[in-house]
Amino acid sequence: MIPFIFSFLILLNPFALFIYLLPLYKEHDLKTFFKILLGASVISYFIYAAFAIFGQRIFQALQVNFEAFRIFGGIVLVSFALSFILQGKKSMITTRGELSKIASEVALPFMVGAGTITLSILIGESLSVVESSFTIATVMILNFLIVGGLMLTRDSLDSKFKLVLDKNAEILLRLNGFIVGAYGIDLVLTGIKNLLA
């Protein structure tokens, strides 16, 4: 169970999520930011739990090859990575509207992606329904606490240090783009390899 939690957190990448969500914090107050993050976490949990419980049967019911999903998910990740690298700050979340709408936009595709869905299916195949649900809930709570903790830390900083953090956030975002892109290519190659096998 613990290895799954660590793997899931690495794929979710709460540090990168913190950087993506900085514009939301700047557009709204801290309380609203936490409401959006909580809403996105709850939406993500139910999506992951559904895939953990029903697994590849979802794809079988839709008559979609799971490897096709993996390849498409990889392509989506590569496109996001390119926007992070080439556009930098412009690719960060800038959404307006109702909190529930913003929360769903944060959940998909920033918190729920092909890699994390694949991992939730593996969790469901390896653990019982109760253990799977508990594992995914633990991951979502830890992710919420890490992102929230980083945002509270930023909020408590002196304005001079906030400015330094915000300027360096774009550099971190571009660097993270290379990691996301590499993972996306890996998903595509794995999907193609499995299809050919």
Image: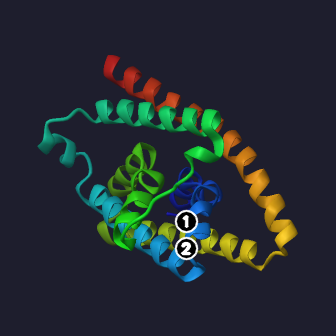
Kindly indicate whether the residue at mark 2 contacts the one at mark 1 (C-beta within 8 angstroms).
yes
**Residue 176 seen in render:** no
Residue drawn at x 56%, y 68% as measured from the top left:
27
**Could you say which quadrant of the image residue 84 lies in?**
top right
Vertical position of residue 150 compared to residue 60: above or below = below
> Relative to residue 65, is residue 163 drawn left or right?
right
In the rendered image, residue 170, in percent from the top left (x then y), is placed at 71, 48
Give the residue displayed 72% in from the left and 76% down from the top: 155
For the residue marked with disc 1, what is the amino acid? Leu
Q: Identify which residue is drawn at 44% across, 27% down.
A: 188
Residue 189 coordinates in the image, percent (x, y): 46, 24
Give the image quarter of residue 20: bottom right
Give residue 15's position: percent from left, percent from top: 65, 58
Identify the residue shown where x is 34% and y is 65%: 101
Task: Please name the residue that numbered disc 1 is placed on.
Answer: 24
* Mark 2 Cα shell of 10 Å, populated few (<14), some (14-19), many (≥20): few
Q: Please tell me which residue lies in front, 33 or 144.
A: 33
The colour scheme used here is rainbow
Asked if residue 99 can be seen in this view, the reply is: yes
- What label does residue 28 carry, if any? 2
Judged from this view, the residue extending furthest toward the top is 196
Counting the numbered discs, the total is: 2
Q: Amino acid at mark 2?
A: His
Q: Could you say whether the residue bearing mark 2 is in a helix, strand or loop? A: loop
